Amino acid sequence: MEKTYRLFISHSWSYDKNYQRVIELIKEQGLSFYDHSVRKSDPIHTNGTDEELYAAIEAKMKGTSCILILAGVYATYSNWINKEIEIAQRFNKSIIAIEPWAAERTSSVVKNAAHKIVKWQGKSIVDAIKELG
């Protein structure tokens, strides 16, 4: 029986297309997975307090196989990325940093926290999930 990986994909809601593309790349590889991410459409995103969002992220990360973080340079300036890294580390979750294709600059904050850094490619992402998850 194939393992179902439980993934938390950290992303900035303003870069929702990148998140959607990562989901597509993983699906194209045929990996069985459940997405624990806090989606842009989640009411906690629009109506919740910072404390509620932190608790929601914490609850979603707790049961995951690994954490995927999009390592675009914008991630360095996101307070939430830092909090997500902190939560992932507290739960001893493996972190996979995904570097965008043409990015000349990527987030050193994300890459320094990562257990594995991969390119924006389905096979690389899925191989890392299978290795660390």
Image: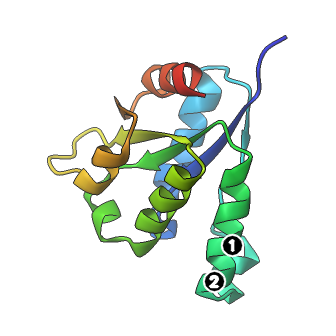
Gap in angstroms between the C-alphas marked 2 and 1: 6 Å
Q: Position of residue 63 (x, y in %)?
A: 74, 46
Q: Is residue 107 visible?
A: no
Q: Which residue is tagged 2?
A: 51
Q: Secondary structure at mark 1?
A: helix
Name, please, the residue furthest toward the top. 1
Where 46 falls versus 23 (above or below)?
Answer: below
Position of residue 23 measured from the top left corner of the image (x, y, whole percent): 60, 40
Indicate the position of residue 38 as horizontal and vertical percent values: 66, 62
Dot 2: element: helix
Are discs 2 and 1 less than 8 Å apart at CB?
Answer: yes
The percent position of residue 30, horizontal first and vertical second, equals 67, 20
Q: Quadrant of residue 46?
A: bottom right
How many residues crowd around disc 2 within 10 Å: few (fewer than 14), some, or many (20 or more)?
A: few
Q: Nearer the viewer, residue 39 or 55?
A: 55
Question: Residue at horizontal 63%, vertical 68%?
Answer: 40
Determine which residue is flagged by label 1: 55
